[in-house]
């Protein structure tokens, strides 16, 4: 039977009452880091193609990737790679049925930001 009170209920949360959550923010960041990793991989492929084709082509892209902007881009790409990996690991944990309650999910979201930053620092020190 049809719901007679349907017109009295809001259809979706309104922007003035919606509060962004850690889980939604971390999920959006996983998608953003996937795009960042794709863009970074295109620069690495460009570098490899430049290395196989000509010295001038390689010198151009190598000069760009070893500049201060290229170093900054690689640093961000390293963080994005670690963050995306931790996001995929979080989804594996959820697929196994663990960590589905809100408090633990929010802690995992915060842990992804902290973990990606720590792993990026370890990567920089190790390289």
Image (cartoon, grey):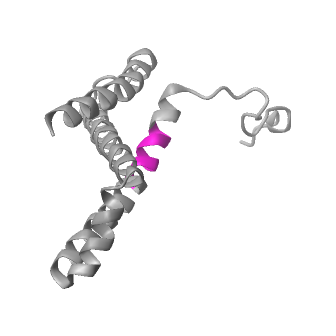
Furthest residue toward bottom: 53
Give me the residue at 79% from left, 34% from top.
Answer: 10
Asked if the magenta segment contains residue 32, the reply would be yes
**Image x and y of residue 17, in percent:** 76, 26
User: Could you say which quadrant of the image residue 124 lies in?
Assistant: top left
Furthest residue toward top: 103
- Magenta region: 27-34
Q: Main secondary structure of the magenta part?
A: helix
**Image x and y of residue 104, in percent:** 38, 17
Asked if the magenta segment contains residue 8, the reply would be no
Nearest the viewer among 57 and 84 is: 57
Q: Is residue 123 left or right of residue 33?
A: left
In this rendering, is residue 104 above or below 115?
above
User: Could you say which quadrant of the image residue 56 lies in?
Assistant: bottom left
**Image x and y of residue 37, in percent:** 34, 54
Nearest the viewer among 24 and 3 is: 24
Q: Quadrant of the N terminus?
A: top right
Q: Is residue 50 left or right of residue 112?
A: left
Count up the numbered dots. 0
Q: Is residue 21 left or right of residue 80?
A: right
Q: Quadrant of the C terminus?
A: top left
Nearest the viewer among 7 and 100 is: 100
Give me the residue at 24% from left, 77% from top.
Answer: 50
User: Could you say which quadrant of the image residue 38 lies in?
Assistant: bottom left
Nearest the viewer among 34 and 47 is: 47
Q: Is residue 7 left or right of residue 22?
A: right
**Image x and y of residue 114, in percent:** 35, 24
Furthest residue toward right: 8
Give me the residue at 50% from left, 26% from top.
Answer: 22
Give me the residue at 30% from left, 62% from top.
Answer: 41
């Amino acid at each position: 039977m049809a719901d007679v009170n349907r017109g009295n209920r809001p259809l979706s949360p309104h922007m003035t009452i919606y509060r962004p959550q850690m889980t939604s923010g971390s999920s959006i960041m996983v998608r953003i880091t996937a795009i960042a990793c794709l863009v970074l991989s295109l620069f690495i492929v460009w570098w490899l193609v430049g290395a196989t084709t000509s010295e001038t082509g390689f010198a151009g892209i190598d000069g760009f990737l070893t500049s201060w902007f290229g170093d900054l881009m690689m640093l961000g790409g390293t963080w994005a790679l670690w963050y995306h990996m931790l996001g995929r690991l979080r989804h594996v944990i959820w697929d196994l049925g663990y960590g589905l309650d809100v408090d633990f999910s929010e802690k995992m979201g915060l842990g992804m930001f902290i973990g990606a930053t720590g792993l990026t620092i370890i990567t920089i020190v190790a390289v």
